[in-house]
Structure formats: C-alpha cells, structure tokens
Image: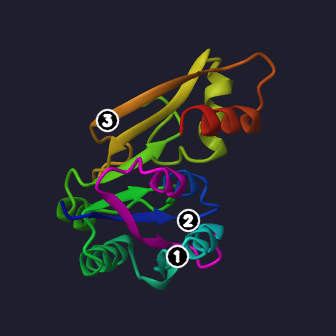
Amino acid sequence: MSKKKIAVLVSGGGTNLQALIDAQKRGELGSGEITCVIASNPEAYALKRAEQNGIKTKVLVRKDFADISSYSKAMRDLLIDEGADLVVYAGFMTILDHNVCDAFENRMINVHPALIPSFCGKGFYGLHVHEAALKKGVKVSGATVHFVTAECDAGPIILQKAVEVLDGDTPETLQRRIMEQAE
C-alpha cells in the first residue's frame, strides 16, 4: 500500500505538529506520512520541529499576498505541487477560502480547541476560545477535529473529546489541559 502524503499547516510553536510527529514515530498514522510542513510565519518554531525530524519545510507568508484569494490559490498550488493527500491544520492561523477547500474537499482537517459549535468561527482562536468559555461559565470544554470548509469551523465533525473546566481555571490553565488531554 502506498504512503499517503500528509502536509501540515502551521503558524506557531507546533505542539500539535509535535504530537503528529510522535504519533508517526509510534506507527500510529497508518499509511500516512508527514512529508511537508508549511508555515504562514517564517519565525514559527514548528519549522524547527519539522527540520529536527527530517521533514521538508516551506513558508508561505500571508502578508506577501494582496488578499486571501491570492494567498489561498498559492497555498492550493503548493499543496498540489507537494502531492498532498491529506492537509492537517496544526495551529494554522489563516482562514483559507474555497480555492483550497474545494481542491481538497474532505481531505483537510483542523483541530479546534473547543467543542464545536461552541466558541468557534472567526476570532475564536488561541486564548480567545478559553477566555470566552470561562466568561460563559461552561463546566466542560474540549477539542474538536473537523473537516475544513470555506466557512470557518463549520465543516463536518470527525471527533470530539471533552475536558472538565475546573474552579479557578485561567485561560492559560484551561488551554494547557485541553492541549494535554484532548488535542
């Protein structure tokens, strides 16, 4: 059986990327293999994680493009050139449009740090998600893996895992626990 090429999109530290790399080393990605990591930020530590594990890296900076449409087309073309069978958002902070989503329909997945449909959509990323959850007073939060569509955080849900919100949680402690227990 031929290996399925996985391209991972990143913007920051790469904790989810590292989890994928570790899973690959344990043989848990089945016929999948991470073949390329593409960053929207040239300073992303995730690039170092990839390089340390012998994974090819590319950088496609959003601000180098006039608009999201031209950036999305460039990303689509890069993913096609890389022969990506599956695209995984791992802390990727740019919302791509239909140019990419249509080309990779049901082959792009994202991990969102909340239980969709709560605390999702434009503006709900990073600590903002956890701040909103704590402000609302929820007792359970978690993470959702879903297919990516042109509408932010609206694609079909693949998997969810709940994490208890504890008294005294801060956005930072909740974020850390969700990363460790669910993401």
Q: Is residue 65 magenta?
A: no
Using the image as rendered, state which of residue 149 and residue 109 is in the foreground: 109
* Residue that mark 1 sits on: 54
Residue at image point 64% right, 37% down:
180
Q: Which residues are magenta?
A: 21-44
Quarter in which the N terminus is drawn: bottom left
Q: In the structure shown, which secondary structural element does the residue marked by tag 1 occupy? A: loop
Spatial separation of the CA atoms under disc 2 and disc 1: 19 Å
Which residue is at a point 52% across and 33% down the rendered structure image?
Answer: 114
Give the class, few, some or many, for how many residues have Cα within 10 Å of label 2's Cα (few <14, many ≥20): many
- In the visual, does 33 lie left or right of 2? right
Q: Residue at x 31, y 35 (%)?
A: 158
> Which label is found at residue 9?
none
Q: Determine the CA span between mark 3 and mark 2.
A: 23 Å
* Above or below 44: residue 144: above
Based on the displayed image, in which of its 4 quarters is residue 127 positioned?
top right
Question: Does 43 lie within the magenta span?
Answer: yes
The residue lying furthest to the bottom in this view is 64
Figure quadrant of residue 155 = top left
Q: Tell me residue 104's x, y (percent).
A: 22, 61
Q: Mark 2 or mark 3, which is nearer the start of the sequence?
A: 2
> Which of pointers 3 and 1 indicates the residue nearer the eye?
1
- Residue 11 disc label: 2
Tell me, for residue 158, which label it has, or none: 3
Tag 3: residue type?
Answer: Ile
Q: Nearer the viewer, residue 139 or 31?
A: 31
Residue 128 located left or right of residue 91? right
The residue shown at (56%, 70%) is 53
Check disc 2 and give the amino acid type. Answer: Ser
Residue 93 is situated, as x and y percent measured from the top left of the image, at 51, 59
SS at mark 3? strand
Q: Position of residue 26 (x, y in %)?
A: 49, 50
